[in-house]
Image (spheres, rainbow, N blue to C red):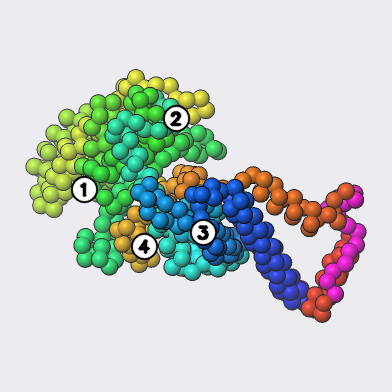
C-alpha cells in the first residue's frame, strides 16, 4: 500500500475520532445543562413559578449542536400579567448571537475577518464539529457588530458627560485618522451613490521595539464607521475614553491628511494637528514637476520657514507659462494654506513633551496608511466587494477589535454563558476518569515500544505504526 493511501486512510480515521470526541463533548454539555435545570426546578420559589413542562432548545458550539430540554415556568411580571420564562436561560446569562456559543461566535468572526463569508463559513465547518452556512456567518457578524455599536454609542455618551470608564494613564496620546472609499450595494448604493468614505481612527500611547528597526504601537484602540464627521468624532472619543483615563492626558497629537473632519479632532486646546508627512510630501511630488522647485520647497519645509514657503509657491504660480503647471501650483498652495498650522511635524515644534512610559518610545506619527490597509482595506476593498452601510459598519467594528487585540474580551462579554463551577469540575472528572484511566498511575510516560491498532480491514496498515521504536 502506498504512502499516499496510508495518509488518506489515516486522515479518515482522524476525522472519525474527532467526530466521536465532539459528539462525546456535546453529550457531556447536554447532561450538565439538564442537571442544572433540574437543580433550578427543585430550588425555585414554587409559589411564584409554576412548572409548565419542558421545551427543546439548541445551542451551537464548536463541538456541534447541543440539544437539550429545559423547564418553562409561568409567572407574573411587575404589572401582574402572565409571562413564561426559562430559569435556566436566566441563570446561564445566555445572551449570545442567537444560540451560538461565545467560542463558536469568535471562531466565526475571526474567520470572516480573514476571508469572505463563504470562505469563513467553510473554514469553521472544516475546523470544528459544527456546520456553518455563509448566511449563518453573516448573521453572527451582524448581530455582534450591532451589539458592539451599542457599546460604542454608550461609551460616546459617557465620554461626552466626562464619565469614561478607561483606567489606562497616558500623558501624551497619539491620534491618527484617515478615510477609505468603499463600494456600496443595494439600497445603500441608491441612497449614497456608488461609493462612500469609511472613516478610521486609531489612538496609542507610544511604541515598543520588537526587533531590529521594528516597532509596535502600544495600547492601540481603533474605530471605523461610515457616519458623518460629528458623530464619528464622538464615537472616537468614546472608544478612547473606554480605554484611557482622559483626565490624565496632558497633550494630544493628531495626524491626518488635512480633511476637515480630521482637523475637527484637534479642536481642544491641548490637541495639536499635523499634516501627515506622507500626504504632504506626496502633494509636492504630484503638483511640482521641476526638480529644482521641489528641492527648494522641501528645504523651506524642513527649515520651518512656512510663510516664506507659501510666498515662494505663490510666486512660482505667477511665473510659469504653462497653464496646467500653474493650476497645479495653485492647488498645492491652497492645500498648504488650509493646513498651514500642520506643515511642521509636532516633534519639531519645540513642545515640552512628557517623558515616555518605561519601555516605550515616542516615534514620529505616520502609521495610518498601514493601518487603513491592515484593518479595513485588506478585507473590505477590491475584489469587486460591495457593502451595505450597516453591513460594512458591523464588519468594520469587529475588524477594529481584532487588530487591536480586543476581540476575544469583547465577544466574551457580549455572548457569555456561565455554568456553576461544580459542573465544570464534574465534566473534567468524568472525562479523565472514564476515558484515560488506563494511562494514569501505571508508569505511563507517553511512549511505548510496541502497541496494537484497530484490526478492521480498512485500518490493518496501522498495525505497523505501533511497532515503531521510540525516538527517545
Give the mark, 4 or 3, whose residue is nearer the N terminus: 3
Residue 217 picture location, percent across and down: 46, 38
Give the mark, 2 or 3, whose residue is nearer the N terminus: 3
Numbered badge on residue 72: 3
Q: Which residue is mark 2?
A: 168
Residue at position x 41%, y 40% in the image:
221
Numbered badge on residue 287: 1
- C-alpha gap between disc 4 and disc 1: 27 Å
- C-alpha gap between disc 2 and disc 3: 45 Å
Numbered badge on residue 382: 4
Tell which of 248 and 409 is nearer to you: 409
Give the mark, 4 or 1, whose residue is nearer the N terminus: 1
Magenta stretch: dominant secondary structure: loop
Locate the N terminus and report the quarter of the image it occupies: bottom right
Horizontal side of residue 464 vs 424, given as left or right: right
Residue 211 picture location, percent across and down: 55, 38
Q: Mark 1 against mark 2, which lies toward the viewer?
A: 2
Horizontal side of residue 9 vs 108, given as left or right: right
Q: Are marks 4 and 1 in contact (CB under 8 Å)?
A: no
Stretch in magenta: 442-455
Does 447 appear in magenta?
yes
Residue 285 picture location, percent across and down: 27, 46
Amino acid at each position: 500500500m502506498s504512502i499516499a493511501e496510508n495518509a488518506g486512510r489515516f486522515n479518515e480515521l482522524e476525522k472519525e475520532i474527532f467526530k466521536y470526541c465532539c459528539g462525546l463533548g456535546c453529550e457531556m454539555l447536554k447532561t450538565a445543562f439538564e442537571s442544572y435545570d433540574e437543580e433550578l426546578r427543585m430550588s425555585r420559589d414554587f409559589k411564584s413559578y409554576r412548572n409548565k413542562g419542558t421545551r427543546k432548545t439548541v445551542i451551537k458550539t464548536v463541538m456541534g449542536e447541543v440539544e437539550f430540554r429545559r423547564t418553562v415556568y409561568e409567572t407574573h411580571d411587575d404589572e401582574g400579567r402572565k409571562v413564561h420564562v426559562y430559569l435556566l436561560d436566566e441563570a446561564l446569562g445566555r445572551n449570545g448571537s442567537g444560540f451560538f456559543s461565545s467560542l463558536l461566535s469568535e471562531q466565526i468572526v475571526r474567520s470572516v475577518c480573514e476571508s469572505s463569508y463563504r470562505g469563513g463559513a467553510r473554514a469553521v465547518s472544516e475546523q470544528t464539529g459544527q456546520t456553518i452556512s455563509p448566511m449563518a456567518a453573516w448573521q453572527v457578524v451582524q448581530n455582534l457588530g450591532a451589539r458592539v455599536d451599542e457599546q460604542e454609542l454608550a461609551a460616546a455618551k459617557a465620554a461626552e458627560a466626562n464619565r469614561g470608564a478607561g483606567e489606562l494613564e497616558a500623558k501624551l496620546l497619539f491620534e491618527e485618522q484617515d478615510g477609505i472609499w468603499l463600494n456600496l450595494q443595494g439600497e445603500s448604493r441608491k441612497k449614497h451613490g456608488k461609493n462612500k468614505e469609511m472613516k478610521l481612527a486609531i489612538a496609542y500611547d507610544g511604541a515598543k521595539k520588537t526587533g531590529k528597526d521594528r516597532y509596535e504601537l502600544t495600547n492601540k484602540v481603533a474605530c471605523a464607521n461610515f457616519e458623518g464627521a460629528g458623530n464619528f468624532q464622538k464615537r472616537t472619543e468614546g472608544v478612547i475614553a473606554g480605554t484611557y483615563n482622559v483626565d490624565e492626558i496632558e497633550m494630544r497629537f493628531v495626524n491626518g491628511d488635512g480633511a476637515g473632519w480630521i482637523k475637527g479632532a484637534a479642536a481642544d486646546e491641548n490637541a495639536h494637528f499635523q499634516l501627515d508627512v506622507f500626504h504632504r510630501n506626496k502633494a509636492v511630488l504630484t503638483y511640482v514637476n521641476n526638480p529644482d522647485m521641489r528641492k527648494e520647497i522641501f528645504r523651506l519645509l524642513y527649515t520651518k520657514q512656512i510663510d516664506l514657503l507659501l510666498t515662494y509657491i505663490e510666486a512660482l504660480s505667477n511665473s510659469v507659462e504653462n497653464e496646467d503647471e500653474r493650476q497645479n501650483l495653485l492647488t498645492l498652495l491652497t492645500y498648504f494654506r488650509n493646513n498651514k498650522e500642520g506643515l511642521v511635524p509636532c516633534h519639531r515644534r519645540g513642545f515640552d513633551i512628557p517623558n515616555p512610559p518605561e519601555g516605550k518610545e515616542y516615534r514620529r506619527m505616520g502609521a495610518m496608511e498601514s493601518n487603513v490597509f491592515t484593518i479595513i482595506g485588506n478585507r473590505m476593498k477590491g475584489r469587486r466587494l460591495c457593502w451595505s452601510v450597516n453591513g460594512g459598519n458591523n464588519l468594520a467594528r469587529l475588524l477594529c477589535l481584532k487588530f487591536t487585540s480586543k476581540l476575544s474580551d469583547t465577544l466574551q462579554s457580549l455572548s457569555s454563558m456561565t455554568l456553576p463551577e461544580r459542573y465544570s469540575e464534574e465534566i473534567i472528572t468524568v472525562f479523565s476518569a472514564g476515558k484515560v484511566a488506563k494511562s494514569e498511575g501505571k508508569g505511563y510516560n507517553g511512549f511505548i515500544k510496541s502497541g496494537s491498532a484497530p484490526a478492521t480491514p480498512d485500518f490493518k496498515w496501522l498495525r505497523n505504526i505501533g511497532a515503531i521504536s521510540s525516538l527517545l
